Image (cartoon, grey):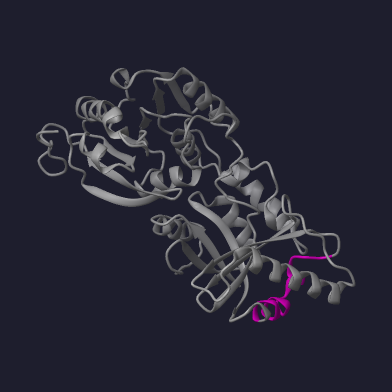
Amino acid sequence: MQILVTVAKGLEGVVREELRGLGLKPEEAGPGAVGFSGSMADAYRANLWLRAARRVLLPLGSFEVKSGEDLYAGALALPWHRALSAGRTFAVEASVRDSAITHSGYAALKVKDAVADALRERLGSRPDVDRRNPDVQVVVHLAGGTCTVSLDSSGGPLHKRGYRERSVAAPLNETLAAGMLLLMGYDGSAPFADPLCGSGTICVEAALIATRTAPGLLRKRPFGFQRWAGFEERIWKRQVEEARSSVRPSPSPIAGGDADASAVRAAEANAEAAGVGRCVQFRRADLSRFRPPAGPGLLITNPPYGDHVGAGEDLAPLYQGLGDVLKQRFAGWRAAVLTGNTGLAKRVGLHPSRRIPLFNGPKECRLLVFELYEGSRKDGNREVEGT
């Protein structure tokens, strides 16, 4: 069975490595996606363990489409009984790109009619539509002349871990936070710090990695596959028990700081909700007063970068201060700064050794990697003059 994992652009390689770690063989599937062949048990495990993925989709089929009639006929012929049975609800979401069908709502309507008619023919009754909380979420993607129809085994975005009790302005997506940690090779064996932690997402995700906690263990709502016809509860329960038994104490310290007391309270609440409250030390501290754990280790942070005109000048002192702290207190560490403002990035005063393109929602950003050598920084990061 072919399975498709959707992912934010830039994190495809991370998800491929995650799949390999689960004993699966990833396949190229284009920007924003990674495929693999596996069983339903493999789909369960992917949902339970993947940290940087958006959703795990099970493609039902692909077919050519030139009209609404083609779309209806192609969808009608698909094996809907794999997931839908009497009494279950469904919903359809659609996206269109360079297609003869230009309206996503129309595409969703045609597929909805096909699903209902196919199941009425097979079961004798039409299933109900529930757009807010369906048992089965159907995903339709029209690109060029091809339509691909999939079932969402995740039952919604995987970044909704279930631990975000409190938030602050512009919180970082959990899967992006985990993706950055994995990009930087973090495994919990070395100290971690985020001196601008906000509501603590990067620190919490670091703690989940360090303790080997499967993110799916935190989920409060059922995964999509748990509501499908044919769900094998025995297999799922065994996977959950195995994941629980793999949890360990964090081997190294994790520290987060923020000047905003409400952000620190939010971070502490989120860490407690994730079950890692004892693993992370949060404290209220201005950037200039932040003290990292004994290193060397890894720092990742996501300072504000503003989208309004003039934000760069407002935030320039923050980035300059970040550069000063990196140079003065993090010698021997590796650091990564996510920003969507190249002008502000220069204010850090160091040349990054790598600039990794990532997307924070629709915003294209760069993850700037700094190797903070002890003593002279002759190879990795030269201080930038005149900034």
Where does the magenta region start and end? 70-85
Residue depicted at x 30% and y 17%: 289
Q: Going by the image, does 143 lie left or right of 374? A: right
Q: Nearer the viewer, residue 90 or 190?
A: 90
Which quadrant of the figure has residue 119?
bottom right
Q: Going by the image, does 78 lie left or right of 286? A: right
Q: Nearer the viewer, residue 103 or 163?
A: 103
Q: Quadrant of the C terminus?
A: top left
Q: Going by the image, does 214 lie left or right of 224? A: left
Is residue 83 found inside the magenta-colored segment of the image? Answer: yes
Which quadrant of the figure has residue 44?
bottom right
Residue depicted at x 44% and y 50%: 362
Q: Provide residue 17's location: percent of width, then percent of height.
A: 43, 58
Q: How many marks?
A: 0
The relative height of residue 122 versus residue 35 in the rendered view (above or below) is below
Q: Nearer the viewer, residue 141 or 358?
A: 141
Q: Provide residue 30's location: percent of width, then percent of height.
A: 43, 68
Q: Main secondary structure of the magenta part?
A: helix
Q: Quadrant of the N terminus?
A: bottom right
Q: Provide residue 271's location: percent of width, then percent of height.
A: 53, 29
Which quadrant of the figure has residue 56?
bottom right
Residue furthest toward the right? 124
Is residue 188 found inside the magenta-colored segment of the image? Answer: no
The relative height of residue 134 versus residue 377 in the rendered view (above or below) is below
